Amino acid sequence: MWKNYLKIAWRNLLRSKVFSLINVGGLALGLTCCMLILLYITDEASFDRFQEQGADLYRIKVTFASDQDTSTIASTNAIHGPSFKMEIPEIREAIRTQSQETVFRKDGELLSSQVLFADPGFFKVFSFPLLIGDADRVLSDIGSIVLTEDMAESYFGTMDVIGKVIEIKLGDDFEPFTVSGVAKSIPQNSSIQFDSIISFQFQESKGWTDSAWMGFYMNTFVLLDHRADYHELGAKMDRVFAANTTEGDAPGEGQQVSFGLQPFLDIHLDANLAGHRNGLTYGSNPIYSYILGAIGLFILAIACINFINLAVARSLKRAKEVGIRKVVGGKRKQLISQFLTESFFLTFIAFLLAFILTQLVLPTFNELSNKHLAFSYLLNIKLIGLFTALFLATALIAGFYPAVVLSGFSPSKSLYQRGKLVRQSFISKGLVVFQFTLSICLVVGTIVIFSQFNYLTTVDLGYNDQNLVRLNGFRGVKTDLKVIQQEFEALPGIESVGIFNGNYNGTGAKIGEESVNFGYIGVDEKFLSTMEIPVVEGRNFSSDFPSDPTESIIVNEAFLQEMGWNEAVGKEVNFEWKNKKMTIVGVIKDYHYASLREKIAPLVLTQDPDYRLQSFFLKLNPTYTGETLKGIEEVFRKHVPYMPFDYSFEDLNNFKRYESEAKWKEMVTVGAVLSIFVSCIGLFGLAAFNTESRVKEIGVRKVIGASIFGIVKLLSVDFIKMVLIAILIAFPVSYFGVQIWLREFAYQIEIQWWFFALTAVLGIGVAMLTVGIEAFRAARMNPVKSLKSE
């Protein structure tokens, strides 16, 4: 019997090739999208789960609160971790990490790489297996270094590297380090990434660490006793902090500093917590996983709805077959079994195609999502259970409803009222409305993401980033940077050259009795003119004022707003941690020195000699040629022969800040296109079936004088109504959804009316085209053929 059911299922599949292709292909496409998205979300959720002690690992975070605002960072100083471990018994281990971009040298060959400084207990706390070496001893010597197997192979060409020496540029000189261990390649789903690790004690031996309690520039991880409640440790750390800070190393008046702990397993999906990277990868915003998950569910829902819709429609077409089977003795149980067998057969084919498509498309998806996903991720027992449940649900719903309904009709009703049965399929209409609602929501989201991304990449940044070259790598250079600056300025094609310290750091100070936090950057007097940042009050730094480096600072407009001032020139800022007062000599126009996700914060520019300048901005003439860049490289090689020529164009750097938005723009666009496509093929299938079921009616109407346009209108109007209802439902839902996403940005677009108008035109236009093609074909049919069809 089952063999017979399968044989009939196969015949029906071949008999209705177009319907079968639409039905099976649409479901397979939806399942493929769902599988790819599940791979992505599974990878995101798997970050750091391999850490054996991950549940007891935490990162120290610090919250600064003042009358103006509250901010939290995940940075500490060298003194925090050891002091907390000594005073708080629940802390079993404290591991400090700090990374540095540097250069390795072997036999005169230079290799740019990033080295991670970490405490000797690093490999005892974190689950990074050592292929060679003892976890208790590999970092015990200040002159030792641990390489990953990838680094060992690329640098030495072999794994036999123990005892070999590598020279690394740290500070002003190349320092020799002896390889003491080789670590297994770091998993891609690890928040901590490194090529090599040096003992943190090396920095301490050089006196490079800062022991100030109000300094924050490294990461500190703590391993707690598994019985400890990490929420309670914040108060204990605050007491240790209060007991150890001195008058010159304490928070300013009106500022409160409090410590807390962030679970290590939460780091990857808590991208909004600021802090120095120090070996950590850039985290992921969970809202994007939610968006992608929603897209996957939308497409899968649309595909399943199509599958069920068309299965129901095709089954209603077979009402006469059901009637005949009942007349010749077929039982209801047998009819239900037949329909369910056919449904399971089609669903199985769709799932099989989906697995094949997923394998084929995965490399492209990896490139799009910037991931390294493997198909084996789907072999997770939970995902296997999920897909099994989805397979059963889809097959049962698609087969059970028509089986029960049709098998319950009397033979006469099945044989003579097929057209009426078709028109009673209100469920199909409701499902069409639902799937177009989902598609329209995705289209609105796509338009908003495109508009926001365009805004992020074209908004006025407050400075001119065109033809602006950033050149790093001058840390510790012997030659005076002013001399190098003059050599750059002498090159043809260069208009201006500014020097700065390379990074924007955060600090705080007092003004009167009030404390303020701000960004802090060291610059020279040509920095502002090179960047084309206007001074709106006061003056720029100048060599005409020899006291500028030790007594003067420049602030931005946001600094004034933070303080509630109308003017700032002449006011003093007390840097208690430096035991120095500085006078504001100028105010610059606000410019975006960070991502547009963040509001422009107060900023202080200084010529403080304690801030070692190490990077250049070079403004090129718009007509510059390759000879200009070649000249820049020659000057660089002359003074920094041991460093790679590390230059970049600032406009591209700014564009890269929004790589995640660019990635999501592409992914959401693909999702929207696929959802519309799957919806349309389902709509086409229903339109074709609706047309076929009304062939005789169309023939009669043509005989009595109906025009082609009138017949097309007759066959299309119900579907257009369904799309209009979907639009009315989708607009408020999508508006609410995109508002939530836009909250991620301090600077964002306004939701425009035309976003929805364009979506409505696209939705109606695509629906009319899809339905109209089939309706036009039916309207042109010869009435004689139409009337003979039954």
Image (spheres, rainbow, N blue to C red):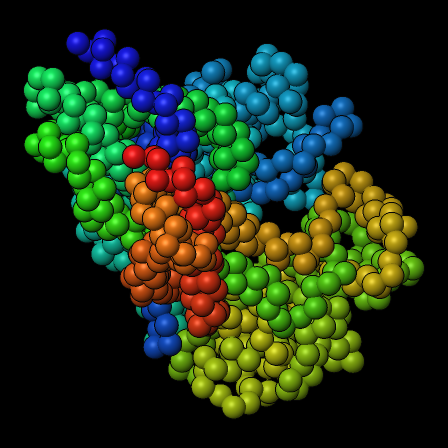
- Give coordinates of residue 536: x percent, y percent: 64, 84
Which residue corresponds to the image point at 41% horizontal and 76% vertical from the top-left?
515
Between 573 and 782, which is closer to the camera in this rendering?
Answer: 782
Which residue corresponds to the image point at 56% horizontal and 47% vertical from the top-left?
208
* Image vertical order of residue 68 relative to residue 786, above or below: below
Between 119 and 68, which is closer to the camera in this rendering?
Answer: 68
Residue 176 placement, left or right of 10: right
* Image vertical order of residue 566 relative to residue 545, above or below: below
* Image vertical order of residue 312 relative to residue 3, above or below: below
For the C terminus, give its image quadrant: top left
Q: Is residue 17 visible?
A: yes
For the N terminus, give its image quadrant: top left
Q: Is residue 64 visible?
A: no
- Give coordinates of residue 74: x percent, y percent: 40, 52
Disc tally is: 0
- Give coordinates of residue 162: x percent, y percent: 57, 16
Between 69 and 311, which is closer to the camera in this rendering?
Answer: 311
- Give coordinates of residue 293: x percent, y percent: 34, 44
* Image vertical order of residue 577 relative to residue 173, above or below: below
The image quadrant of residue 224 is top left
Which residue corresponds to the image point at 90% horizontal and 58% vertical from the top-left?
491
Which residue corresponds to the image point at 78% horizontal and 76% vertical from the top-left?
543
Residue 406 placement, left or right of 526: left
